[in-house]
Image (cartoon, helix red, strand yellow):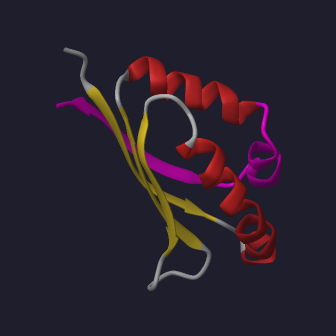
Amino acid sequence: MTDMIYLNGHIDVPLDRVAAVEAALPKHIELTLAEPGCISFVVVPSTQIDGRFKVAELFVDRAAFEAHQERTKASAWHKITDGIPREYTIREGE
């Protein structure tokens, strides 16, 4: 059995870029959820810190997670969020 990949953390969007990120987010979520091996993908605004979006991802295995990473490198989401600080932890397990 393969181990699932869990990613949790946040992205801190500069306030002058929040509108662009919010506009691009629904398509990014839609495309990610359609990927083979994506079990869950949630990105929600923080209620405590302006510009922060909490991120929680779950993929069936490392291969599915890495395929997601590769797809996003060529996406509009990557261009819109380029250079924005992210803080994630990635855990592998059941």
Q: Position of 12 compared to 37: left or right?
A: right
Residue 71 figure quarter: top right
Q: Position of residue 64 (x, y in %)?
A: 47, 24
Q: Quadrant of the C terminus?
A: top left
Magenta highlight on residue 92:
yes
In the image, residue 68 above or below residue 80: above
Q: Position of residue 47 (x, y in %)?
A: 45, 85
Residue 90 figure quarter: top left
Q: How many marks?
A: 0
In the image, residue 31 above or below residue 13: above
Residue closer to the observer: 66 or 16: 66
Q: Position of residue 29 (x, y in %)?
A: 60, 54
Q: Quadrant of the N terminus?
A: top left
In the image, residue 93 above or below residue 31: above
Residue 38 figure quarter: top left
Task: Look at 54% across and 67% down and name the residue there.
Answer: 53
Q: Position of 29 compared to 87: left or right?
A: right
Q: Position of residue 18 (x, y in %)?
A: 73, 73
Task: Look at 57% across and 31% down and name the residue there.
Answer: 68
Magenta highlight on residue 68:
no
Task: Look at 75% across and 43% down and name the residue there.
Answer: 78
- Which span is picked out in magenta? 74-94
Residue closer to the observer: 88 or 4: 4
Task: Look at 25% across and 17% down and name the residue there.
Answer: 2
